[in-house]
Every structure is written in structure tokens, then in C-alpha cells.
Image (cartoon, rainbow, N blue to C red):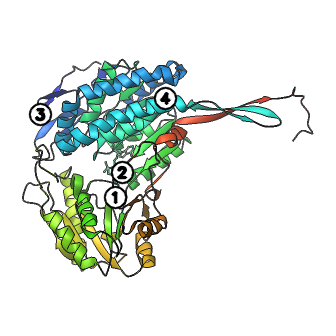
Amino acid sequence: MDHPLKMLDVAGVAVSPHHYIDGHRVASTGSFELHCPIDQRLLGHVDEGGGAEVDAAIRASQRAFPAWSALSAAERKPFLDRFAAEIGKRADAFCLLESNDAGVLLSRMRHGVVPRAMLNITWFAEHALTLQDRPIHTEQAHHIVRHDPAGVVVVITPWNSPLLLSTWKLGPALAAGNTCILKPPEWAPLTCSLLADAADAAGLPPGVFNVVQGSGAHTGARLVSDPRIARVSFTGSVPTAKWIAQAAGANLVPCSLELGGKSPFIVLDDADLDNAAATGALMYRNAGQVCLAGTRFLVHERVAERFIAAMRGHVERLNVGDPREEATEVGPIIHPRQVERVLGYIDRAVAGGARVLWGGQRHPFGAQYVQPTMLTDLRQDAEIVQNEVFGPVLTLQTFGSDDEAIALANGTDYGLGGVCYGETAHATAVAERVRTGFIWVNSFGIRDLAAPFGGIKRSGIGREGGDWSFEFFCDVKDVVVPKKPFRASFSQR
Ligand code: NAD
């Protein structure tokens, strides 16, 4: 049965609450409520996909795959360049939507996220031109090593940066010749819906890019369990990743898993303390809902007091407020449930003997705001040292030697990233011994599309970025052509 189509009006932007399947908007009976994290107002009802929508999207992607994958990278590039251009034409709308449904700073959307989303598409479209057959010549044979697109790719992203994280996966997946189904986060789905408008306006063939909305348990679980899919590219939490790995694993479908972090922020005794403290305050960006933030401060005991004073100064100047205002630096937490989770972590840590250096409570700006918080006097096995909070809550421990700093840095189950401040050669040497997927020396957040990104231990499996994205989204095939006429023989090796 066809259901009537409608549009939502969110902050003056018209956005579809429906799925996008096979080049059309598709409505379904089920829906979920979407609320604004800034003031809790109802933004609208968004469709929830079930078995029928999942099946339709997979069939559409399968139908589109032969023609899309048969194009050369050079032939796909104009489609993707137009896709990026259509994102650019809707820049204001993307900014307003993600500010309103995810609470991301409008200024960050405008200057960081939207340009990066466009680059995620154009950079991989360009880089795919390097995906040439690789010849290997041996005594026996010519090998033609091909990177063939894998098939139907399911992309699942979290709410803390839906546009950026979705395009970071879609760019390489599409450029390599796959067809895609995006399952947006249910707490912040609107920019993913607008992405479908951009793809449609760019003339991407029907079925090449689809969006099926809904919750993880209802919609996402159906997508990742389906044996017709070729890859799952997931960013989100560890418990969800374990579930997805099992569901996809039942069909031997490869997964790329970008997960949480509890990254160390190391301050050595020869660090530029004010610089380190200014960077430290950045860890409250997006209200701390950033996987790659350095959330465990490990500070040399000789400089701890001075560092704390310097960072306190930077934190006191942070502008907490409405993310739609230009001057705001720290916005809301995505959902009331997440606020309770964050406050619960603080309460239990304090009950266990932690000392609050600053913050520690709900912020007066609004119900979904928590004060930028720093806790200290913590043992390494404390819950808040070991677990990702995903809110504006940091911890601080001190150390007396490099070995001790490294032992503390490596002393959790996570291994996503890290930050290390100190004299450059010293900080680099320490950084090299920290067991994570990446680490920034005297800096933070430098992300080059050509470089590998991802975590070790519980922080994930696989790498994204540059050639690593293509390795995941492609099937490597060796076409072997013997140099001499081949004669069948049982004695052959
Ligand atoms: P989440 O795991 O709850 O949800 C992520 C996505 O998975 C959502 O779209 C959700 O609907 C979907 N999902 C949930 N259950 C599912 C299931 N059974 N099958 C299929 N899909 C399912 O994570 P979240 O709370 O939305 O995001 C926060 C987490 O994401 C944090 O742990 C954070 O560190 C992590 N994260 C990691 C990175 C990275 O690159 N490493 C980046 C951003 C966020």
C-alpha cells in the first residue's frame, strides 16, 4: 500500500521524513519521534523501516550494481562531483538540520563538517582513478591483480556527526563502484535524509544510493543480517559492534568497525603547558561526544599543578549555550537518556572517592546540558577511567616517568587515539609506544583523507581513509595468465 508523502519543516528547512529507495521517496506506516536536544521540542515523526523497506532497498541496490560497477572510476567521477556540488548548494540547510537534531555547533557545521562532507565525496572519486590493475610478473605467469567492487554495502552511522561520518564511508564505497544503503542514526537522521536529495539532484542512478531510516534494533539489525549484502561499514559503540559482527559473521560478511575510545592525553614535563591546556579545552567540543577526543589526562607530577591552573583558565572561558549561535563552543547532549548516563558516571566516580576539579553537574543552560567536568584522584581501575563516557567529562591522573605514563596510557581495553604534548622528539618517542590506531604529537584532530584512521583492541577492526577504504570496499582478484602454454599434470606443484 502506498502511504502519502509529506515534508517536515525544521528551522525553516523542508526535509523529507521518508526513506529514499530506488530513486524515490518511500513512506512507511511505522515512525519514531525526533526531538531537538537544545530545547526538547518535537521536530517531527520520521519513518521507521521494517522488513519491506529493507528488502526493497537491497533489491534496488542489487539491480543498480551491475551498471554502476561496470563504469570506470573516471566515468563515476562526474556523478560524484555533482553529488558533492549538490551538498554544497544545500550547505545552509545541512548546517541548520544537524544543529537542530544533533546539537552540533552551527559554526562547526559551516566551516568544518559541510566542506569536509563534500571533500569526502570528491577526494575519493579522484583517488579511485588510482585503483588500477596491478600487474605482477613472475617466471611462470602474468598476474593481473584487480580491485573489484564488492556489491551492496550497508553503512551505519552514529548521531554525534552523521553527515561527516556517513560521507566518509559513502565516498569511497561509491567511488569504488559499490551500491549503498545508509541507515542513519535514529536520534539525528535529518542530514542523511537531505543527502538523498543531493544524490537525487546529482542524477545518481536509482538504487545506487538508498536511505532506510529506523532504529538499530528494528531496521539496522535487519540490514546487517541479510545474506545479500557484501559489506557492513559501521561507526558506533562497542556493544552494537559486537552484535553486528555476529549477525554479519553468520553470513561471513566482512565488517569495518569504528568504535569508541578512551584515549590518553599525555602532558610530559617538557610540554608547552599553555598550548597543551588550550588543546585540552578542545576535548569539550561537541559536549565531549567525540570518539577521538583525548579524555584521560595523564600529566607529569612536576607540572600537574601548573597545567591544571592553565586548563582551568581555558575551560572557564568556554561558551556553553545554543549551538545555533556563532559564539557558542559547547552545546547540548544528544538525548535525555545520554544525559542521565553521563551524570551517572560522575556521581559514581565521586561516590568512589574522585575529586571534582571543575564542573560535575548539570549545566544551568538547559535540561540536556552538563558542565565541562574534570575529575581526579582516580585509580586506574576506576569505572570512569576504564569506560567511555561520551560526554563533557574528563579524568586526570599524574605520573612520574615516561614508563609510568605509557603503562597508564595503555591500561584500558580501548585503543583508538591519543594526544602527546612535550618536546617534539621526546613526545614522539613516547607517542610511538602508546598502543592506539593513531596519536597526535603537540596537536589534535589533524585528519588527512589519505591517512589511515581506526582503532585497535575494543576500539575497532579495520582502517578507513585513502587506500585502506578501498581495500575494504573491494574484492581483490588475481587473474593469472601463464607465460608458457599450460599442460595439465598431476605431478605439478
Ligand atoms: P550505537 O552503537 O548505539 O549506534 C550507532 C548506530 O548503530 C546507530 O545508527 C544505531 O541505530 C545503529 N544500531 C544500533 N543497534 C544496531 C543493531 N543491532 N544492528 C544494526 N545497527 C544498529 O552508537 P551511538 O550511541 O549512536 O554512538 C556513539 C558511539 O559511537 C560511541 O561509542 C562513539 O565513540 C562511537 N563513535 C566512534 C567513531 C569512530 O570513528 N571510531 C566516531 C563517532 C562515534
Position in image of residue 17 (x %, y %): 23, 29
Q: Are marks 2 and 3 in contact (CB under 8 Å)?
A: no
Horizontal side of residue 388 vs 106, given as left or right: right
Q: Is mark 3 on a helix, strand or loop?
A: loop
Mark drawn on residue 443: 1
Position in image of residue 309 (x %, y %): 19, 73
Amino acid at the residue labelled 3: Ala
Q: Is mark 4 on a helix, strand or loop?
A: loop
Q: Nearer the viewer, mark 1 or mark 4?
A: 1
First in sequence: mark 4 vs mark 3: 3
First in sequence: mark 1 vs mark 4: 4
First in sequence: mark 3 vs mark 1: 3
Of the pair 420 and 255, the residue shown nearer to us: 420
Q: Distance between the residues labelled 4 and 3?
A: 34 Å
The reply to whether residue 391 is visible in this rendering is no
Residue at the spot x=30%, y=77% of the render?
Answer: 378
Q: Distance between the residues labelled 3 and 1?
A: 36 Å
Residue at the spot x=10%, y=42% of the render?
Answer: 41
Amino acid at the residue labelled 2: Ile
Q: How crowded is mark 1: few (under 14 residues within 10 Å), some or many (20 or more)?
A: few
Q: Residues within 10 Å of mark 3 (few under 14, many from 20)?
A: few
Against 469, residue 381 (above or below) is below
Q: Name the residue under label 4.
A: 178
Amino acid at the residue labelled 4: Asn
Q: Is mark 2 on a helix, strand or loop?
A: loop
Mark drawn on residue 446: 2
Q: Mark 3 points at which residue?
A: 11
First in sequence: mark 4 vs mark 2: 4
Q: Are marks 1 and 2 in contact (CB under 8 Å)?
A: yes
Q: Does the residue labelled 4 lie within 8 Å of ligand 1?
A: no
Q: How far apart are marks 1 and 2 (CA)?
A: 7 Å
Amino acid at the residue labelled 1: Ser
